[in-house]
Image (cartoon, grey):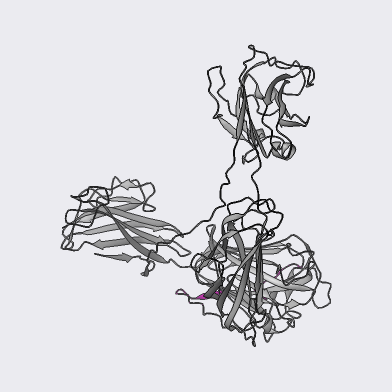
Amino acid sequence: MYVTLVSLMQQLARICVLIAGFLAFFTAPAYAQTTIRYTNSTDSAAGAITNTNTCSIAAAFQRDFVVTDSFTVGDVNLGTLLSHGDRDDIAIFLRSPAGTIVTAKVLTGGAANNYNVLLDDQAVTGIAAHTANDVATAATVVPPYQRTFSPANSLNASFAGQNSAGTWTLFICDFDNNGVAGGDGSTGTFFQADLFLTPPVPSADLSLSKTIDDATPPSKGTAVYTLTVTNNATSEVDANGVQVQDIFPTGVSFNSASGTGSFNPVTGIWNVGTVAIGTSVSIDLTVNIDVGPGGTITNSAQIVSSSAPDNDSTPNNGSTTEDDDDTATFTASGTRIAGTAQPLVCPAGTSIFDWDVRSWVPGSLNNDFFQAGVGNVNIALTTTTTYQPRGPTGTTPSPYLDNGAFTGGLTPAQNALTYAVDFADRQEIHEAIITFETPIAGAQFLLFDIDFTSNLFADQVTVVGQLNGVTVLPTITGGVTNFVNGNVVTGDVPNANTSADGNATVTFTQTIDTIRVIYGSDPVLSPVNPSGQTMSIHDITYCNPNADLSVTKISQIVADPVNGTNNPKAIPGATVRYCILINNQGGIAANNVTADDILLSNISYVADSLQSGSNCSGTLTSEDDDDDDDAETDPFSISYDPAASPRGTITGLADTLGPAESFAIIFQATVD
């Protein structure tokens, strides 16, 4: 069986191969805790919770929890069940035996009725967001409570560390919705409250260090990373089941490991095992380096699992600032040469967005330009810092078009959009967003002056493309004074403003409608105050918009005569579901898109099984087998011709398939 695809605008198809992958996720463990519940289920008289002039202890409605157990409090949750006609009249307070009072709920909830809620500091949503009616009657059984929210003020932060023993008191005040007594007249009835106290879990204070034996290893050589996990002497328990994840970046690959535990180079997991109180364990990871001379590689690792909680860090939270993670950086030795950018291949030819024929009012931040064949091109600039004047006299407001101070080594010099910014810290950025009204099938442009000056700045530029909001990543080719890691180029060598050494070439090989150029500072190489920095965006050579069609065919065995639908096999009599997906990855619409699937002699079409849709698993439309489309209401047409081949031909037609749109043909067949 095979598929043919024809478009009257473009007779081009690429066969796409679907590759199934998997992701492994590591989550922090749940630590064993013993939670003790204390209940007060003494119902009040009907309407006993009523408007008061003040919320004093003497005036408020109250219920006590007498706790005879004595332990240090670690976690506190509070559940309350009561009826009330207007929940934003209710305020709830909890007092510990030590006399600490916490406001758990204030006057929130709108006009909703009743209160059936567990307050838990770990809940994502706060109680102020609760506006729905609750169920609360004398017959309502709790726990579990109907809803869980975090309290208005943290219970744990106020009570943790106190002794549990003594009388805990719940206070409930009833105001009107303006906080004034005697308002709307609604009252409430108390049914039950539960106080949940949890002793703290003994903790281990783990830390991780990561070092490299050579800060300037050969660009084609080896180096040794050393990972060390320490359980501080002040820890309360040994840490078991400790795991560290170290995923090597591009340019670094696994060679061998020696030391405590075992290392899996596929997952990057170092199975450390047990780290006793006051001890350290280490592993040496020898890696192969394949980086261009002068290339800088940063590699981070983090503790991702432990049997014991850690009070000052959280395993596997992606942090780079806690003591359970660390980073090592090296710069490959050797003489760096500028890379060679890949050619831009464009089936419909190229055009240039040329700054030499454009104007830009110095200091302006948003401009529209008409570009033949594309329509409007919008360029919007934003920054979290301030611009600096530049230009030949040093007084031209930035951003501006420059063809003298920053030339990228071009002869003769050409205009480029240039901006000078004053970054006060490593987090500040400048962003240029270039939007094309009509998607383009690829693009290539130069960035000028991406470099580094010690104790002043370290340029870092991230480039991201988009098509209909979906991320498209470019290939960046570095120069002599910068290095590339994925879609990020970082300056690490000084560059003259008029030299090509600081250039980086950005190449998009896929269709895009937006380019984002994010300018900032390297978080390691730059000083804390990077100060003034400048870069330029040169002309954009782009592929002329065109339709770009691809076809993918997938199959699924849905049943067989022996196993039915339970793990069916491709045996005679089995039913197979096919889906043919045609996608327009180009920048303009393709018209009259026709797809033919010629059935081979080993399968038979199942009558009236045709369906169409925009994808293989979404909303589908049933189709009849003939090619009479007078009654069709959907944008697609599918038919089956039994005489067109030995077993017939399936034909699908889409009148128009716009950019990023797809067309699915679904049918069933039996295996002969």
What residue lies at 16% left-to-right and 56% top-to-bottom? Answer: 572
Q: Is residue 529 above or below residue 105?
A: below
The relative height of residue 378 versus residue 101 in the rendered view (above or below) is below
In this rendering, would 268 be left or right of 128? Answer: left
Image coordinates for residue 433, horizontal then vertical, percent:
64, 63
Q: Main secondary structure of the magenta part?
A: loop
Tell me where residue 321 appears, x and y as whole percent. 69, 60
Q: Position of residue 475 (x, y in %)?
A: 55, 73
Q: What's the residue at 65%, 84% (across, down)?
A: 333
Quadrant (top left/top right/bottom left/bottom right) for the N terminus: bottom left
Residue 17 shown left or right of residue 476 in the figure: left
In this rendered view, identify the residue nearer to me: 11 or 219: 219
Q: Is residue 348 magenta?
A: yes
User: Magenta residues, as a range?
Assistant: 344-362
Q: Is residue 258 left or right of residue 638?
A: right
Q: Quadrant of the C terminus?
A: bottom left
Residue at 55% from the left image edge and 70% from the top image edge? 474
Residue sitting farthest toward the top: 45
Number of labels in the image equals: 0
Q: Let me know if residue 106 is in the magenta part.
A: no
Q: Nearer the viewer, residue 505 or 381?
A: 505
In the rendered image, is residue 115 in sight? Answer: yes
Q: Which quarter of the figure has residue 479?
A: bottom right
Q: Is residue 169 left or right of residue 273?
A: right
Picture quarter containing residue 188?
Answer: top right
Residue at x 75%, y 71% (from the top left corner)? 526
The x and y percentages for residue 361 are 74, 67
Q: Quadrant of residue 380?
A: bottom right
Which sits in the foreground, 401 or 669?
669
Q: Please say if 77 is above or below 617.
A: above
**Residue 251 seen anywhere in this rendered image of the structure:** no
